[in-house]
Amino acid sequence: MKRPGIQDMGLALCLLLLAVIAFRPSGVLGSRLQAWNAERQVLALYRAEWREAASSRRSTLGSDGDAPVIFEFSDYQCPFCRSSHEAVAGWATSAAARIVLVHVPLSDRSREAARAAICAEEAGAFPRMHDYLMTNDEWVTEEAAWESTADAADVPAGTWFARCLESTATAERITRDSALAVRWRVTATPTFVSAHAWTIGEVSDGDLETLLGR
């Protein structure tokens, strides 16, 4: 039996050293392993919170029946959120999915828009306000009054609407949504999360199959 020579031992040591380097946290495989473990932890976390998170939010599009739930972490001034709107609205209209909007405003005006959308829920008109905010630009300028925006979106407005816009409860809703984004490690809008997968950025009709795990 041939005994290992100096060259063989040197090769083994080189391979061992390469493995150590690759699997250390800053190495290529180590960093990928860390990312994979982090993703598994996030998936486990949001699956554990899934039912409660879906039932406690009223900014929804689509039927409340048996349609699968997709969370959309969104901002009303985000260009990719706006360009995804037609496809997402189609998923809800066709009853292929129920969309749960999680408001993650990235600017002061977007925060005001999220408040207006939340307040429209009180009149059962969230889908109309959401559609208007996603497809029109008139509200973007600070001169535009939110009561006028509500009228344009065919949302009944009055003194109750103005009070709702300024209420602590409305602000707390946005805070809770932002906290959910932090817990689920959502770092960009739009981010779509289902029970099977998640995707970041603009979506089209074809992305529904991925999100539904088909």
Image (cartoon, helix red, strand yellow):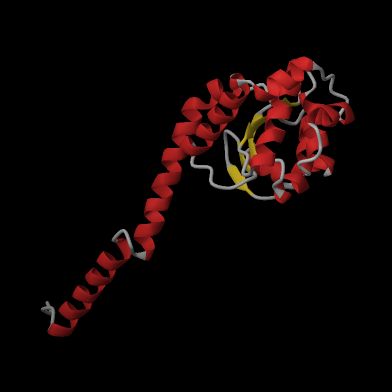
Name the foreground residue: 168 vs 61: 168
Q: Quadrant of residue 150?
A: top right
Image quadrant occupied by the C terminus: top right
* Front residue of this view, candidates 14 and 74: 74
Give percent across and percent down for residue 164: 69, 20
| Number of numbered discs overlaid on the protein picture | 0
Residue 13: % across, % down:
19, 74
In-front residue for pair 109/43: 109
Q: Position of residue 77 (x, y in %)?
A: 71, 45
Look at the picture and state if 179 lies above or below 52.
Answer: below
Residue 36 in the image, given as x and y percentages of width and height = 42, 49
Q: Is residue 70 visible?
A: no
Horizontal side of 34 relative to 17 (left or right) equals: right
- Measuring 59% from the left and 21% from the top, which residue is drawn there? 168
Q: Measuring 82% from the left and 20% from the top, which residue is drawn there? A: 157
Quarter-of-image position of residue 121: top right
Relative to 153, 204 lies left or right: left
Instruction: Place residue 55 in its image quadrant.
Output: top right
The reply to whether residue 41 is visible in this rendering is: yes
Which residue does the image show at 32% across and 65% down from the upper left?
Answer: 22
Return the residue found at the far front: 143
The vertical placement of 64 against 12, above or below, is: above
Instruction: Quarter of the image for the N terminus: give it.
Output: bottom left
In the picture provided, is 137 more to the left or to the right than 78? right
| Above or below 213: residue 119 | above
Q: Return the residue nearer the eye: 150 or 42.
A: 150
